[in-house]
Image (cartoon, rainbow, N blue to C red):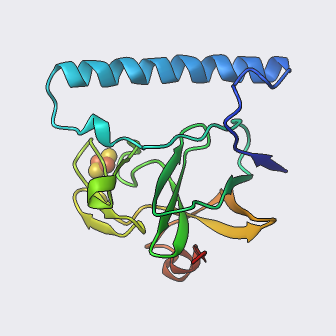
Amino acid sequence: MSREATQAGEGDCGTDECEVTTGRRTFLRDGLMAVAALTAIAGAAAPLHALAREYATGRAGAAGMVSYGIPAGDGATIDRTNKVILVRYQGMVHAFDLECPHKGTAVQWQPEQNRFYCPKHKSTFKAEGTRIQGKSPRSLDRYAVRIEGGKVVVDTGTVIDAEANAAGWSAAGVRVG
Ligand code: FES
């Protein structure tokens, strides 16, 4: 079943199940924010300002389809709820798993360098997901994407590993410009 990623609040589900899920998400999000604040206080090198410049929220749930508006320009949107990064770069749109392929740390978008950065072990990746350097054993994992009804539809049910499925990884993108 397709679920739309929207800017809507998290409390609009109207079911007990959603409330439980939302509470857990809120707890995790608050925890991550506290860790980020402590990291900043400690003067860590991680460029916190380089975290995603735009956030889209959606409803967590079983793996499936998530849809987004077609990005108007180059850049990255990070949907932490669904662990999806949507990138438009040089006329192509790709969707990545938010987790670094090395140990699963959430990667950060560095818009000034058009690249992704993993703060855990400092791996870097090009905007289209290709590994540049660092401990990550491979490029960012992609999801299959397609354009449908004027939206980018991301299939989060299948993670495409660049090493295990090089052809599938290369094909996981859509031209939008
Ligand atoms: S978790 Fe990303 S490089 Fe180790």
Is 54 located above or below residue 160 in the figure? above
Question: In terms of image quadrants, where is residue 163?
Answer: bottom left
**Where in the figure is residue 151, as x and y percent of width and height?**
73, 61
- Residue 66 seen in the figure: yes
**Where in the figure is residue 157, as x and y percent of width and height?**
69, 56
Look at 24% across and 56% down and name the residue there: 135
Q: How many marks?
A: 0
- Residue 137 seen in the figure: no
**Where in the figure is residue 138, as x and y percent of width and height?**
36, 66
Is 3 located above or below residue 14 in the figure? below
Residue sitting farthest toward the bottom = 167
Q: Is residue 2 left or right of residue 51?
A: right
Look at 60% across and 37% down and name the residue there: 81
Look at 57% across and 73% down and name the residue there: 173
Look at 57% across and 78% down and name the residue there: 177
**Where in the figure is residue 176, as x and y percent of width and height?**
60, 75
Is 120 located above or below residue 87 in the figure? above
Q: Is residue 56 left or right of residue 1?
A: left
Question: In terms of image quadrants, where is residue 111?
Answer: bottom left
Residue sitting farthest toward the front = 72
Q: Which of 54 and 38 is in front in this view?
A: 54
Is 130 located above or below residue 158 in the figure? below
